[in-house]
Amino acid sequence: MTKVITYGTFDLFHEGHYRLLQRAKELGDFLIVGVTTEGYDQTRGKLNVIDSLMTRVENVRKTGFADEIVIEESPGQKFRDIKKFNIDIFTVGSDWTGHFDYLNDYCKVVYLERTKDISSTMLRTQKKHIQRIGIIGTGRIAERFIPEVNLVSGISTQGVYNLNTESSIRFAEKWNINSYTEIEDFFDAVDAVYIATPHETHYQYIKMSLEHGKHVLCEKPMVLEKKQAEELFRYAKEHNLVLFEGIKTAYSPGFSKLMGIACSGMIGSIRNVEACFTKLENPASRELTDLKFGGSFTELGSYTVLPIIKIFGTEFEDIRFDSIKDENGLDIFTKAHFKYPNGMGTATCGLGVKSEGHLIISGTKGYIKVDSPWWKTTYFEVHYENPDDVEKYSDRFLGDGLRYEINDFLSMINGNTESEFKLTQKDSITLTEIMEKFMLENR
Ligand code: CTP
């Protein structure tokens, strides 16, 4: 008996998939089809798969060609499957020619000619209008945004606007996008806006963008007053627009895995969360000289407060801040202490004091230690009373990690609300409330 195996995502099942499976089956007597999970696809940089795993498996099954269907979850699985199932032939479409030659040592590798003029990517694009996103701001974070947008299908960077026209032109030339001198022209050309300007300008730009009917992805902290956050979310909802705060950690696969494990009961009931994020900034930087909006907490607090409110919720009993201040009065190191009925949390931020960037989640049965930089979650360990009892988990955080939030922002524009739980509007409003309280007490 000749056993054949093939793999694919099989999103929006199409004729190319059907013909590939048909020919794969004809290569032997028994065909195994590996359907790739969304999680694994994401690690390969393939974002925005539309059909659920169940639908994709069902579509493969319906062709009648697969004698067995397996799920492909990780790199290295192809080799293991070939051994495990005693495979004679490995086959995929000719778009992969050469890529799997290394498997020739274990079985025969056959590249089948790919069906022309059809692909899932093409169907995804046809199904949905490509969202043209415009960037307001030309700073460091805006620079990181463009290569990340390019990795998400269904969205493209249209252009940039900055009050400072010269800087806008320079930025546009560098990234080969349009620059707009008039904000009205900018709004006319885009469907969605990414706001990457200094914190204090966010409110006005979000408001303007929403009033022009644009979806908004705004850098954290979204705004600095609770009533502004409430007003903007209300307006967005009334006008069917997506307003989304960009805290990259919240959307990264590793952080989602961490939250799932932390809240699964594995370490019992959680009683304490300690999150620390410090980076030494140049004393002349905006972050350490802007007397109204600078300082460590406004800069980094969104990250360190995130795990605390994701775990304990937004209804804390008390919050208290301790800061060490520079001569100019700006905090170079801040600790925010949270008190909940059954737990506590500390969010530590530093721009002029360096520390280990740790996240420790303590429970009644054990604790989770997330390696620095935990805000780009890639590795964590679950520890128990017995020091030898350690479980290790890892996930990827690719590039600058903005691709994950862009992907979820786009999904929400396309009407998919599945990712809303990662950072809810209530979470964003609470984060703003905390920022506002800090600023009232410290400015
Ligand atoms: N395939 C094919 N002909 C096509 C499209 C896909 O033979 N027109 C093959 C691929 O080479 C692969 C299998 O079908 O062996 C599953 O491919 P998958 O990556 O799921 O499909 P694509 O349409 O290529 O998806 P995407 O556009 O997301 O890359």
Image: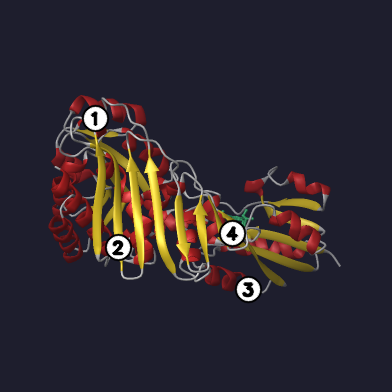
At label 2, the amino acid type is Lys
Q: Earlier in the sequence, mark 1 or mark 4?
A: 4
Residue sitting nearer the eye, 413 or 337: 337
Q: Earlier in the sequence, mark 4 or mark 2?
A: 4
Q: Which residue corresponds to the image point at 72% horizontal and 66% vertical from the top-left?
A: 32
Q: Earlier in the sequence, mark 2 or mark 1?
A: 1
Q: Spatial distance from mark 1 to mark 3, Cα to Cα?
A: 52 Å
Q: Where is residue 151 shown, x and y percent of the image?
A: 45, 45
Q: Which residue does the numbered mark 2 point to in the structure image? A: 339
Residue sitting nearer the eye, 95 or 252: 252
- Residue 255 appears anywhere in the view: yes
Q: Which mark is residue 16?
A: 4
Number of residues whose C-alpha sits closer than 10 Å to that of mark 1, classed few (under 14), some (14–19) or many (20 or more)? many
Q: Is residue 15 above or below residue 321?
A: below
At label 1, the amino acid type is Ser
Q: Which residue does the numbered mark 1 point to in the structure image? A: 168
Residue sitting nearer the eye, 125 or 330: 330
Q: Which residue does the numbered mark 3 point to in the structure image? A: 61
Q: Contact, CB < 8 Å: mark 2 with mark 1?
A: no
Q: Spatial distance from mark 3 to mark 2, Cα to Cα?
A: 52 Å
At label 3, the amino acid type is Arg
